[in-house]
Amino acid sequence: MLDYKKRKNLLHEALEFGDWSRRDFMKKSGVAAGTLLAANQFSFANAAGKKVRVGIPLTYGPFNQPWRRGCWQLVKTVLDMGGEPVTVRGEPTKASEQQAELALLDRDIDVLVMGIYSLEPETEYIADEAKARGVPCVGFAAPVKDSPAVLEDTWATAMTLGYYVHNALGRKGTIVQTAEDKGFYSPFDMEADMLELMTRWEPNMNELPFLPGSVSTKDQISKGRENMLALLQANPEPGSVSAHISWWWTLTVGAGQAMQQLGRSDVRLFNHYFSDQFLSEMAAGTYPIEFSTDIPWHTIGTKTAELAMAMGSGETVAPNHYRVPTTAIVQEQAAETLAEVKEMDRQAIALLKEYGG
């Protein structure tokens, strides 16, 4: 296993592609992250002089802690800027979030937040209906027709994690990727495709077939465990699989549990997305979770809220896509990061329960 100094060097090299550092993780979580709108000092009242009502679908599930942190900052920033959050609770599926968005259009809102699962062609009809009613839209981690959106930097995330894995392995060996089922969440598909392409051009590396990981309304920890048990049984020789890369934290935890069950420690685990449970497992070092990237969803929520408040007050906002950078940690930083994430989750739960979250 690499020593901490070597891991830090690899982390620094990988993060050059994401232009982010773990020290910025909390500093960037507040209103300061969105300077574009703050400098304009809008009055944030709608045309009738009332509070701006922002429609926000709360469609995260029990495993979607990063998404919940985004909704927390979205609601909090609207409140901090004098607006009124209007929420509809749903489930983490395309159908549910679209139903929630349509329901919000009937709640006398001034602006509609849309996201995170549905792609632009899938929600075009909702954006058109909102426009017909004079309600502007903003994308929350998803593009929306003729509207601004705040998105993760998907390709930078894939490069950050991909280059770390390649360099940590010395650009040799066999890897396998997993994520939620293809077609369920497009950024995971894009990231997996990017890493597959990167690996294809490494002459001493090989990639096994992708492992589907079900959807976030299912028990994905069990699915990750099931997948890894099957993988190790099919590849019993130590070292036959060099690395397991998961784009969703539940599948990493399940994979680690399977390794522990079989007494295997030769497969190095690499992950995307933080959660309390994942960071606890990473900090404990029970199984070899070496590195994890994450998307600062709290920053996405803040920026989305600022755009929404500006549009809801009548300001014209260009339909640009704003992208947040990637953050990442190595195993030795997991405990400190866990404390930070736990505090954010505590605040998120306390605020969102007032809005059905």
Image (spheres, rainbow, N blue to C red):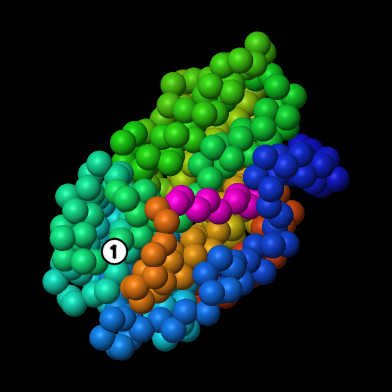
Where residue 291 sits, quadrant-wise, is: top right
Residue 327 part of the magenta-drawn span: yes
In the image, the segment drawn in magenta is 320-329
Residue 184 percent across, percent down from the top left: 31, 41
Q: Is residue 172 above or below residue 311?
A: above
| Residue at the spot 74% in from the left edge and 24% down from the top edge | 170
Q: Amino acid at mark 1?
A: Pro
**Residue holding disc 1:** 136
| Residue at the spot 85% in from the left edge and 45% down from the top edge | 5
Q: In this view of the protein, can residue 241 be seen by the observer? A: no
Of all residues, the one furthest to the right in this rendering is 5
Residue 195 percent across, percent down from the top left: 55, 28
| Residue at the spot 23% in from the left edge and 44% down from the top edge | 122
Q: Secondary structure at mark 1?
A: loop
Where residue 15 sits, quadrant-wise, is: top right
Dominant SS type (magenta): strand
Quadrant into which the C terminus falls: bottom left
Q: In this view of the protein, can residue 194 be seen by the observer? A: yes
Q: Is residue 99 left or right of residue 59?
A: left
Q: Is residue 171 above or below residue 247?
A: above
Count up the numbered dots: 1
| Residue at the spot 73% in from the left edge and 32% down from the top edge | 168
Q: Is residue 275 above or below residue 266?
A: below
Residue 186 part of the magenta-drawn span: no
Where residue 126 sits, quadrant-wise, is: bottom left
Of all residues, the one furthest to the top in this rendering is 203
Q: 147 or 232: nearer the eye?
A: 147
